[in-house]
Amino acid sequence: MRELTFEDVTVRFGSRRLGTVAVDGVNLVVPAGQVVGLVGESGSGKSTLARAAVGLAPLTGGRIRLDGRPVQAFKNRPLQMIFQDPYSALDPRMSIGASIAEAMPRGEPDRRAEVGRLLELVGLSADRAGARPDELSGGQRQRVALARALAGRPEVIVADEITSALDVSIQGAVLNVVRDLQRELRLTMLFISHNLAVVRYVSDIVAVMRHGRIVEYGPVEQVLMDPQHEYTRELLEAVPRPGMPLGN
Ligand SMILES: Nc1ncnc2c1ncn2[C@@H]1O[C@H](COP(=O)(O)OP(=O)(O)O)[C@@H](O)[C@H]1O
Ligand SMILES: [Mg+2]
């Protein structure tokens, strides 16, 4: 796993005069083997930053690097993104096993065994490989989306609001999978949510985004105990105390 860095990244939609600056000069480091939780209210630019990282939004300015090299210089899609809506990642006509296998590198010797291994890694039974997405719950589909992202052996995973569309009752289970995977595989991950309680649960580092800028960045405990920015304090006030169910 490698370190992901955003250097002075700007993304503008539309014209210079009438357009929107969705991401405004962002500098952000996702250290190798760590989870950076990116939090901020809706419209703050989180998804645009994520999409820029995987090449889905054009940069107006700045650079995105992996271990110092431009991300575009890497072959085999070094970043894998997981989206809020698990349907968008999974072809409804394909079995989930085929969807996962499709994301594997060319030289994978035993795809079937690897599909089984990945399904079990995300807490699903290997014998579900033949199931179609519509036979699964939303939480199970997000597990499959995670397995599919891992199948591509990415350097970095970008997860954008992956629990936001799920029932509160199953959000925790999916977050546990993310946390367990992180402990086991030391993933480098940019984990995005509008919900600070969700971000806190899985992150080593928190970055707070507002109006296209990072207004606060630091180790999760430090930011939560001693927030420096007024906006972070506001986000914290909306968070239930530890032990309470996750809000949405
Ligand atoms: N493709 C687009 N075209 C024009 N404006 C966009 C586009 N995508 C996002 N925006 C605008 O950029 C801003 C940030 O959006 P977004 O990155 O989706 O925020 P978040 O994920 O934090 O909710 C918003 O004002 C949004 O309307
Ligand atoms: Mg978003």
Image (cartoon, rainbow, N blue to C red):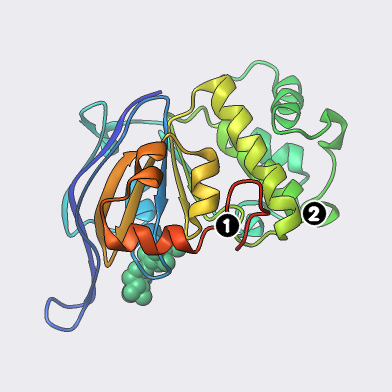
Along the horizontal axis of the image, is 28 left or right of 101?
Answer: left
Which residue in the structure is indicated by mark 1? 240
Residue at point 64% right, 62% down? 165
Query: Residue 118 location, x and y as percent?
Result: 69, 28
Q: Quadrant of the N terminus?
A: top left
In this view, the residue farthest toward the bottom is: 18
The residue tagged with tag 2: helix, strand or loop? loop
Q: What type is the residue that disc 1 sits on? A: Pro
Q: Residues within 10 Å of mark 2 (few under 14, many from 20)?
A: few
Q: Residues within 10 Å of mark 1 (few under 14, many from 20)?
A: few
Res 98 quadrant in image = top right
Which residue in the structure is indicated by mark 2? 137
Q: Nearer the viewer, mark 1 or mark 2?
A: 1
Nearer to the camera, 241 or 121: 241
Nearer to the camera, 77 or 174: 174
Res 149 quadrant in image = top right
Query: Residue 189 location, x and y as percent?
Result: 44, 36
Asked whether the beta carbons under mark 1 and mark 2 sit within 8 Å of each other, the answer is no
Residue at point 81% right, 57% down? 134
Evaluate whether residue 121 shows in this view. yes
Q: What type is the residue that disc 2 sits on? A: Ser
Residue at point 21% right, 78% down? 19
Along the horizontal axis of the image, is 212 left or right of 142?
Answer: left
Residue at point 79% right, 35% down? 124
In this view, the residue farthest toward the top is: 109
**Above or below: residue 58 compared with residue 130:** below
